[in-house]
């Protein structure tokens, strides 16, 4: 790459890096994994830089690369979660934290597949068929995975003050 293209890429990374890192963090759930994921996606983007003519689509290109790389990594990992004999009690969050932080923490507690499906659906605004193709699963599996994930998130994000507002019988 010539110096001008290299400089243009560097400026893009400096300007958009923090937002892209947040997206990577939502996909992986771990800061170090997010950094690795973003680095891999930016490397792919750098190699394709001269072929990307629509600079307005760069974020979409990098996010798509992150999703594809994350799926590839996810498929290579061994199953790290096993069913439990008992369902743990939901963690009730107090009013001390900020809601976006609580949502992020709740997302972090989801299994990888559920977290990925929720991020693709609600953060990346992908349709269920698009998610199914990206993850290599059926549309029905996407629907049930997102539904179960949202139920877990609702349980995780129950705020005690909201329960007190309900009329007593």
Image (cartoon, grey):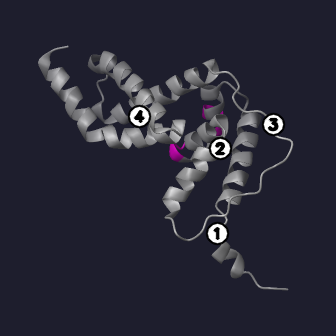
Which is more toward the observer, 10 or 89?
89
Q: Which residues are magenta?
A: 123-130
Residue drawn 71% across and 52% down? Answer: 152
Label 4, on which residue? Answer: 60
For marks 4 and 2, the one nearer the N-term is 4
SS at mark 4 in the image: helix
Label ID, residue 110: 2
SS at mark 3 in the image: loop
For marks 1 and 3, the one nearer the N-term is 3
Question: In front of the other: label 4 or label 2?
Answer: 2
Label ID, residue 159: 1
Which is more toward the observer, 67 or 28?
28
Is there any visible trace of residue 126 in the rendered image?
no
Q: Quadrant of the C terminus?
A: bottom right
Which is more toward the observer, 169 or 144?
169
Label 3, on which residue? Answer: 83
Residue drawn 66% across and 24% down? Answer: 136
144 relative to 23 in the view: left or right? right
């Amino acid at each position: 790459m010539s110096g001008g293209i290299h400089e243009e890429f560097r400026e893009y990374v400096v300007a958009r890096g923090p937002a892209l890192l947040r997206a990577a963090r939502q996909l992986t759930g771990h800061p170090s994994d997010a950094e690795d994921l973003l680095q891999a996606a930016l490397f792919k983007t750098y190699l394709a830089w001269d072929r990307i003519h629509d600079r307005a689509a760069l974020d979409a290109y990098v996010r798509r690369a992150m999703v594809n790389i994350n799926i590839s990594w996810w498929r290579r990992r061994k199953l790290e979660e096993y069913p439990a004999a008992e369902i743990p009690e939901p963690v009730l969050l107090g009013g001390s934290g900020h809601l976006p932080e609580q949502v992020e923490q709740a997302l972090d507690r989801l299994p990888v597949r559920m977290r990925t499906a929720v991020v693709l659906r609600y953060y990346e605004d992908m349709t269920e068929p698009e998610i199914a193709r990206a993850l290599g699963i059926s549309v029905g599996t996407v629907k049930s995975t997102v539904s179960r994930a949202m139920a877990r998130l609702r349980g995780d994000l129950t705020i005690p003050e909201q329960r007190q507002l309900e009329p007593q019988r």
